[in-house]
Amino acid sequence: MVSAETPDCLIVTGMPGAGKSTVTRLVAERLPRSARLDGDFISSLVVSGRVWALGEPADEAARQVELCNRNLCMLANNFSDAGFTPVIDWVIPDREQLDFFASLLPSRQVLFVVLAPGIEACRYRNALRDPRERFDFDGYEDLDVGMKRELGDAGWWFDTAALTPEETADGIIREVWHRALVN
């Protein structure tokens, strides 16, 4: 179990609609001292000149993703140093980005959970969102194949298709230390 005595860094990823935002909030609420770090929010701090992760120009999109990743890790280190477990909510699509996170969190145990309810569940959940929160995305198949190829042996791939967000959060709290350790 993640605890304040071991302020590890928990990273929760998955495709759009996998439940990252809801589950990370619930996990953070269940921990005695935690901070939820939302990659979408950190990314949105760039107001003028923002390019989303798959946007154009591609080199600027990559630069801004790296900036967001650096900021997430700096915040995670700061919260962890203060005794809070950082719970990161962010799409990490490949090994390179996961390794980048681990390199910027050198004194932390990195716990990595991929919420994996399947493509159809993600599409369905995304469609149920309030239109202002919906993420228009047509790359599910490519992202799924890429994540499985690049990250299939990393952390804990948690099939949450048949679970409620609360059951998912409880499962993470109960099992993450045994299943999700990256370093």
Image: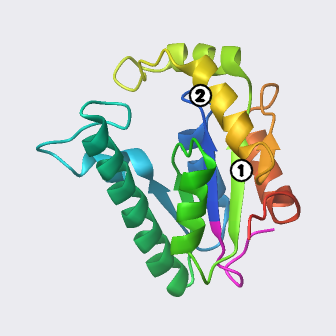
Does the magenta portion include 110?
no
Q: 171 or 18, which lies in front?
A: 18
Q: 54 or 136, which lies in front?
A: 54
| Horizontal side, residue 13 vs residue 129: left or right | right
Q: 54 or 180, which lies in front?
A: 54
- At 71% from the left edge and 85% from the top edge, which residue is drawn? 5
Does the magenta portion include 7?
yes
The mark that comes first in sequence, 1 or 2, is 1
Q: Residue furthest toward the left?
A: 48
Q: Position of residue 164 (x, y in %)?
A: 74, 32
Task: Please identify the quarter of the rendering in which residue 132 is found.
Answer: top left
Q: Position of residue 149 (x, y in %)?
A: 72, 36
| Horizontal side, residue 56 vs residue 84: left or right | left
Q: Main secondary structure of the magenta part?
A: loop
Residue neighbourhood size for the residue with mark 2, other residues' Cα within 10 Å, grouped as few (<14), some (14–19), many (≥20):
some
Q: Position of residue 153 (x, y in %)?
A: 81, 48
How far apart marks 1 and 2 lie (CA) works out to 16 Å
Secondary structure of the residue carrying numbered label 2? helix
Secondary structure of the residue carrying numbered label 1? strand
**Do the numbered discs 1 and 2 sit on residues whose CB atoms are within 8 Å?**
no
| Horizontal side, residue 121 vs residue 39: left or right | right
Q: Is residue 165 visible?
A: no
> Which amino acid lies under the numbered mark 1 shown in the image of this protein?
Val
Q: Which residue is mark 2?
A: 143
Which region of the structure is painted magenta? Answer: 1-9
| Horizontal side, residue 10 vs residue 176: left or right | left
Say the numbered circle drawn on residue 113.
Answer: 1
The relative height of residue 36 versus residue 64 in the rendered view (above or below) is below
Q: Position of residue 35 (x, y in %)?
A: 51, 66
